[in-house]
Image (cartoon, grey):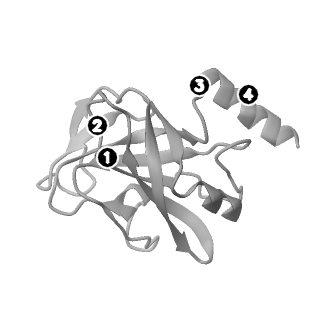
Amino acid sequence: MPLEKSCEQYKGSLIFVLPTIGFGWSQRLPSTPRFQPGTGIEPPVPFHAKLMEFHYFLNAIKAGIGIVEKKDHPLDKQWVAFCIRDRGEDIYNLATKPGYYNISIGANKPVIKIDPDNFAMPEWMQFESSPYLSGLGYITDSVITFEEIIERIKNARKS
């Protein structure tokens, strides 16, 4: 489930975040109990984010953090954290084999705590005592449609 180490080349660059409906998006408050959904919201419109850092577990990239950079976007300048949802052995990248991510967005920089024995994947991204948005989506190296993502996934499975 990790990202290829070649993804390190994208640090400091803009990546494209395409939120999807999946299990739904929600706004979570610090008082929202663990394992309880937050208040349901519509997924954010797609945006660019500057990729700031990756987080490793067992020598593999499992999560990342960036800052939304899209002028006039309601989330501009907020922090975005992500981790891949797949627990399998597949290895993803941001170009030819996009992955499906847990995504969280908030005003304060999140803390990444990768601890599979004690936290569900979405809990790896912790905004601690501030509200944040939580949902699912794809992350790629450039602007892309959902249909193009599906095509890239199909092509990656063939190779």
Q: Residue at x 67, y 51 (%)?
A: 93
Classify mark 1: helix, strand or loop: strand
- Of mark 4 and mark 3, the one earlier in the sequence is 3
Q: Which residue is mark 2?
A: 75
**Vertical position of residue 90 compared to residue 21: above or below:** below
Percent of width and height locating residue 100? 56, 43
Q: Amino acid at mark 3?
A: Phe
Percent of width and height locating residue 110? 30, 61
Q: Amino acid at mark 1?
A: Ile
Q: Quadrant of the C terminus?
A: top right
Mark 2 or 3, closer to the camera? 2
**Does residue 145 appear left or right of residue 156 in this picture?**
left
Q: Quadrant of the N terminus?
A: bottom right
Q: CA distance from mark 2 to mark 1?
A: 8 Å
Q: Which mark is residue 105?
A: 1
Q: Which residue is mark 4?
A: 151
Dot 3 alpha-carbon crowd within 10 angstroms: few under 14, some 14 to 19, many 20 or more: few
Q: Residue at x 41, y 35 (%)?
A: 23
